[in-house]
């Protein structure tokens, strides 16, 4: 990041991506530090954790849209329209927070890990679609801005995030050795490590495409990054996530207040 001019509008999606990464790490640390204060604080802290993940996915989608979509003939119309892609990204980003918060209800306790992973996978397919469509359906001949360097990073991103999602959903290794991994080495710990490594590779993917495809993309597309449609839009989405968390937190307080005292 230090080698990139921060006053260049075309770099704004990458800056927004970096903000999303920093935010998800900060909120995750906050949630894991303070969740043990009470049962309600545990759930509310992780509501914010889910919101941070949803916000991160939107910021990541912005960077992949501006830097990683094909410069050839587009297969999906939404990859040619910033308004359509951002609208779809906002919906799925907010859906992550709503679904993950709702899955914390006791009725879903046996399936919540699978449900959360399923929602995140669907969201991942949406936000990475500019890259995956280009990767799977285009080559040197059909994409004038083909970039083989970023493909290496994207493959690593898939591997790390795929492994992280798999161990979290399967609850291994603690499912195989009950009691051994209660404090360290459980699936939640491993998922954090693997997904953090995957996030790093996703950032490198966007950065490599910014540096290697910029000229062709600016000639091919009229839509350009601005402060409003990148960082500004990300802040609006963040407000939406916070509003969802506050709604679920308020529902928790109402339920607790309505419980009969012993």
Image (tube, grey):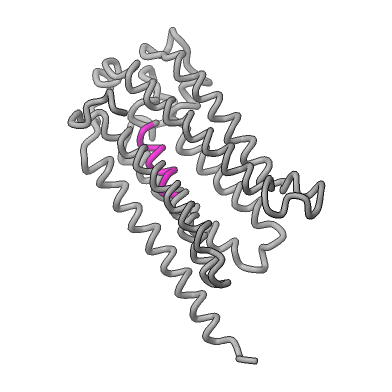
Instruction: Tell whether 38 sits left or right of 87.
Output: right
State the residue at coordinates (27%, 43%).
231
In this rendering, position of residue 67 left or right of residue 111: left
Residue 187 located within the stretch drawn in magenta:
no
Residue at left offset 53%, top offset 21%: 136
Q: Is residue 132 left or right of residue 159?
A: left
Q: What's the residue at 37%, 21% (across, down)?
A: 209
Q: Quadrant of the C terminus?
A: bottom right
**Measured along the vertical axis of the image, is residue 124 above or below residue 240?**
above
| Viewer-side residue, 43 vs 223 | 43
Direction right: furthest residue: 177
Figure quadrant of the N terminus: top left
Q: x and y percent of residue 4 in the render?
A: 26, 25
Where residue 100 sits in the image (x, y, percent)? 55, 57
Work out whether 44 lies above or below 232: below
Q: Is residue 56 above or below residue 210?
A: below
Where residue 12 appears, as percent x and y from the top left, is: 26, 34
Looking at the image, which residue sits at the far top?
Answer: 141
Is residue 57 shown in magenta? yes
Q: Position of residue 131 (x, y in %)?
A: 45, 27
Label total for image: 0
Write the start and end of the magenta stretch as one range. Answer: 54-63
């Amino acid at each position: 990041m230090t080698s990139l001019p921060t006053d260049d509008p075309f770099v704004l999606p990458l800056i927004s991506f970096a903000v999303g990464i920093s935010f998800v790490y900060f909120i995750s640390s906050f949630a894991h530090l303070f969740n043990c204060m009470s049962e309600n604080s545990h759930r509310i802290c992780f509501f914010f954790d889910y919101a941070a993940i949803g916000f991160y996915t939107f910021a990541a989608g912005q960077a992949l849209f501006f830097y990683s979509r094909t410069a050839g003939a587009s297969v999906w119309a939404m990859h040619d329209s910033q308004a359509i892609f951002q609208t779809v990204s906002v919906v799925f980003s907010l859906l992550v927070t709503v679904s993950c918060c709702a899955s914390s209800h006791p009725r879903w306790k046996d399936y919540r890990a699978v449900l959360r992973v399923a929602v995140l996978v669907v969201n991942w397919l949406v936000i990475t679609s500019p890259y995956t469509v280009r990767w799977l359906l285009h080559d040197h001949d059909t994409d004038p801005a083909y970039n083989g360097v970023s493909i290496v990073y994207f493959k690593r991103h898939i591997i790390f995030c795929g492994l992280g999602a798999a161990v979290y959903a399967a609850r291994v290794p603690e499912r195989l050795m009950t009691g051994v991994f209660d404090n360290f080495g459980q699936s939640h710990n491993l998922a954090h490590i693997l997904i953090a490594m995957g996030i790093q590779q996703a950032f490198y993917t966007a950065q490599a495409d910014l540096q290697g495809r910029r000229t062709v993309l600016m000639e091919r597309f009229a839509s350009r990054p601005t402060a409003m449609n990148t960082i500004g839009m990300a802040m609006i989405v963040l407000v939406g996530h916070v509003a969802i968390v506050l709604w679920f937190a308020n529902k928790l307080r109402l339920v607790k207040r309505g419980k009969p005292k012993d």
